[in-house]
Amino acid sequence: MKILSGIQPSGQLHIGNYFGMMKSMIAQMESSELYVFIVDLHAMTSVHDRDRLTTGTLEAAADFLALGLDPERCIFWVQSDVPEVCELSWVLSTIAPMGLIERCHSYKDKVANGIEASHGLFSYPVLMAADILLYQADQVPVGQDQKQHLEVARDLAQKFNNTFGETFVVPEPAISKETAIVPGLDGRKMSKSYGNTIPIFLEGKALKKRVMAIETDATPVEDPKDPDKCNLFAMLKLFATPERLQEVHELYVGGGAAYGYIKLELLDLISDCFAEARRKRAEYLADPAMLREILKKGADKARAKAMVTLDLVRDRVGFKY
Ligand code: ADP
Ligand code: TRP
């Protein structure tokens, strides 16, 4: 089974990214052929700053490695190091119906949130389909927000296969039920573009400030509260043991849940959860030459795989005259 997913280096990675995608990718290293990449071409739809993009790319690499991704047991690379993806993206764009791409809500959401409406932003799902189809991925672990993009990839794979002959694997999304949408500080989806995140590697006062800023309602401590409607409880679910969660659940339902104390508990849990990874991350970031070498080796492996698919595509569409 080939499992593939990518992440944008467009800002600090946050706990929504971790629970929505990174954790399940890392867990599948043993059992699958794993493809993990940093999508800098996609990040260009919102980042037009050379230093931010290069730093973001190296940091995203350090984050993944620190969290346990082993580059010897997967293929780990930076998207732009395999330029074949751009050729496939063009080919797919010629069969992508306008209506299909126009229906994608992520474009409208991003524009509504202030990202410039560019052609790249609009055609983002086609490049994403090329990412997935180029490596013939069977499964793509993502958060709920990417489900529609997976549908585009499936539609394009099927359309290409019907038009030019069997070529692509039709990929399946893998969305974990519990962490499909990790809420942000304000209760909306946690997202870099909404400024409502808890970055994975934040620490000290900065982390405390974010955790204390989690929005809660004004119900008095002693009154019963609905844990399923509480943003703070949803975050606690990600970190607390089932036993502790049960206790806090009872406090919500029976009265006595003090948001301030629960936030402090969550703060410690987040800090402890990533303590070891935080140390490793600092080591990786202190050695950018090593990071580059890991990524270049990964790109060589990815490129060899990409060439096989692209060669077939070129033949199918008629580039081999
Ligand atoms: P962002 O919205 O912060 O820019 P990305 O689009 O880079 O995040 O997402 C990278 C991966 O993390 C994707 O698989 C996405 O579905 C997942 N993801 C992002 N935010 C969340 C969230 N709040 N809950 C669950 N998964 C998420
Ligand atoms: N669009 C994804 C996101 O914003 C990132 C991405 C690009 C991706 N190409 C991909 C995810 C291929 C999975 C597979 O999170």
Image (cartoon, rainbow, N blue to C red):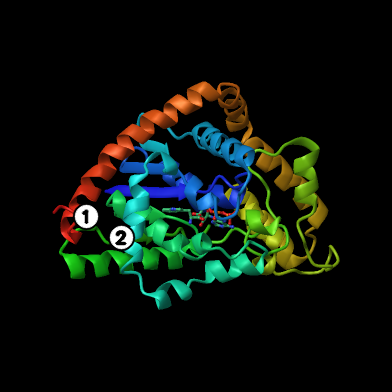
Please, what secondary structure does the residue beneath circle 2 have? helix
Which residue lies most toward the front here? 321
292 left or right, relative to 189: left
Check residue 91 in the rendering and tell me which mark sits there, or answer none.
2
109 left or right, relative to 314: right
Q: What amino acid is labelled 2 in the image?
A: Val
**What residue lies at 68% left-to-right and 59% top-to-bottom?**
194
CA separation in Å, label 2 and label 1 = 9 Å
Q: Is residue 177 visible in the rendered structure shown here?
A: no
Mark 1, Cα crowd under 10 Å, few <14 / some 14-19 / many 20+, is many
Who is closer to the viewer here, 269 or 106? 106
Circles 2, 1 touching at the beta carbon (< 8 Å): yes
The quadrant where ligand 1 appears is bottom right
Instruction: List x then y, in percent, for residue 287.
Output: 56, 21
**What residue lies at 53% left-to-right and 48% top-to-bottom?**
8
Please, what secondary structure does the residue beneath circle 1 have? helix
Quadrant (top left/top right/bottom left/bottom right) for the C terminus: bottom left
Which residue lies most toward the bottom here? 99
Check residue 100 in the rendering and tell me which mark sits there, or answer none.
none
**What residue lies at 33% left-to-right and 52% top-to-bottom?**
87
Instruction: List x then y, in percent, for residue 25.
Output: 43, 45
Check residue 313 in the rendering and tell me which mark sits there, or answer none.
1
Q: Name the N-terminal-most of marks 2 and 1.
A: 2
Q: What amino acid is labelled 1 in the image?
A: Val
Where on the picture, by quarter, is residue 27? top left
Instruction: List x then y, in percent, for residue 18.
Output: 55, 47
